[in-house]
Image: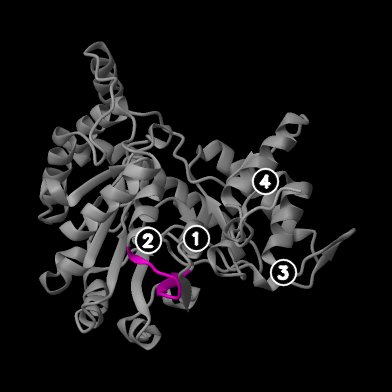
Amino acid sequence: MIQLSDRLMAMEESATIAMSRKSRELKAQGKDVISLSLGEPDFFTPQFIKDAALDAMNNNFTMYTPVPGYDDLRESISLKFKRDNNLDYAKNQIVVSTGAKQSIANVVLSLINEGDEVIIPAPYWVSYQEIVKVAEGIPVIINAGIENEFKITGAQLEAAITPKTKLFMFSTPCNPTGSVYSKEELQDLANVLKKYPQIVALSDEIYEHINFVGKHESLAQFPEIYNQVVTVNGVSKAWAMTGWRLGYIGAPKEIADACDKVQGQFTSATCSITQKAAIAAMKADPAVLSDMIAAFKSRRELVLNALNQMPGVITNNPEGAFYVFPDISSFFGKKYGNYTINTAEDLCMYLLDESLVALVSGEAFGDPNCFRISYATSEEILTKAMKRIAEGLAKLS
């Protein structure tokens, strides 16, 4: 009998991918399932980016590239960091990877030893905790409730720090909540981090441009902690390039070199064609994204308005990304037919079976009182989905 590794057995399957698979299976059976489970924009990659990819192929950029990425791509990322974030990352502080997920894994594997503690505010993106567990680190979770817009304070961060703390990781704008940290809120965290120079902060900013409150703020902007911060970003979300697979970090050179070494043994560089296409995205004025961002904002309003008319559903006001993370704990203990709702997972499965809408339980994101709705689809589909959810919830008593 084949014996799988303890590492694998300790790892949970990605809940977003699992729910997406279940909804595809039901669709294959002919059921009209609406999936709001994956964080994937329904927009197509802009034509000027696709043109850059075609040019790269026609000019035979089809060979292996340097592990951390083409020099011209890393130079364009360096310019993007300066233009958009006022962050100074030299080319040799930037490592390009096969998606931001690999960027995060590279950092964690470069820093974490067995027993090291990693502070993660909850709700968190589903893979943070699992990547830490693969590195044999210990996730230390700080609960940030809906009443606090799902954000933590410096005082909460400091209370979680122990002599074993090695890393703090979070996202802004946040997946799954859509919460956005202000400059003042980040300064509060920075004031704590500067007291602990041995702690590295990983700031996941992949949703940077999908921001409804104005200017995005980066944690690394504070000079007193610049050398402690790894900034993670990529092209998947704002540039609608999920399938192209490209993420990147700006980091202290020591960490960038470590990630280069790790990646060199796992995957080497990401796709050469994707890299050349990403240069076009990095050089583009983010203003070209305004129509897409306006569409996401309109969808957010549609979903929030619908949820706020559903008795028992509690929402906050997400300021970025393309998710709503409502508290649905008032439905726990309710029943319909053969269904009894004891958890958010139960409610998601009920809505999938009864209403044919796929959502993701908040348990996977560290908050068992919520579920995540992705509104990265058309208003027509969202309207139909919200109607189905409302009817499904109304049946529970």
> What distance separates the C-alpha of mark 3 from that of mark 2?
37 Å
Question: First in sequence: mark 1 or mark 2?
Answer: 2
Q: Secondary structure at mark 1?
A: helix
Q: Which mark is residue 143?
A: none
Instruction: Please tell me in which quadrant of the rendered image residue 142 appears.
Output: bottom left
Query: What residue sits right under mark 4 in the picture?
Result: 357
Residue 358: % across, % down: 65, 47
> What distance separates the C-alpha of mark 4 from that of mark 1?
32 Å
Whether residue 74 is situated above or below residue 84 in the rendered picture:
above
345 relative position to 252: left or right = right
Query: What residue sits right under mark 1 in the picture?
Result: 134
Q: Residue at x 57, y 50 (%)?
A: 16
Residue 365: % across, % down: 54, 63
Q: Secondary structure at mark 3?
A: helix
Name the one closer to the observer, 115 or 214. 115
Asked whether the viewer can see residue 297, the reply is no
Contact (Cβ within 8 Å) of mark 1 with mark 2: yes
Residue 224: % across, % down: 12, 74
Q: Amino acid at mark 4?
A: Val
Q: Which mark is residue 108?
A: 2
Contact (Cβ within 8 Å) of mark 3 with mark 1: no
Q: Secondary structure at mark 4?
A: strand
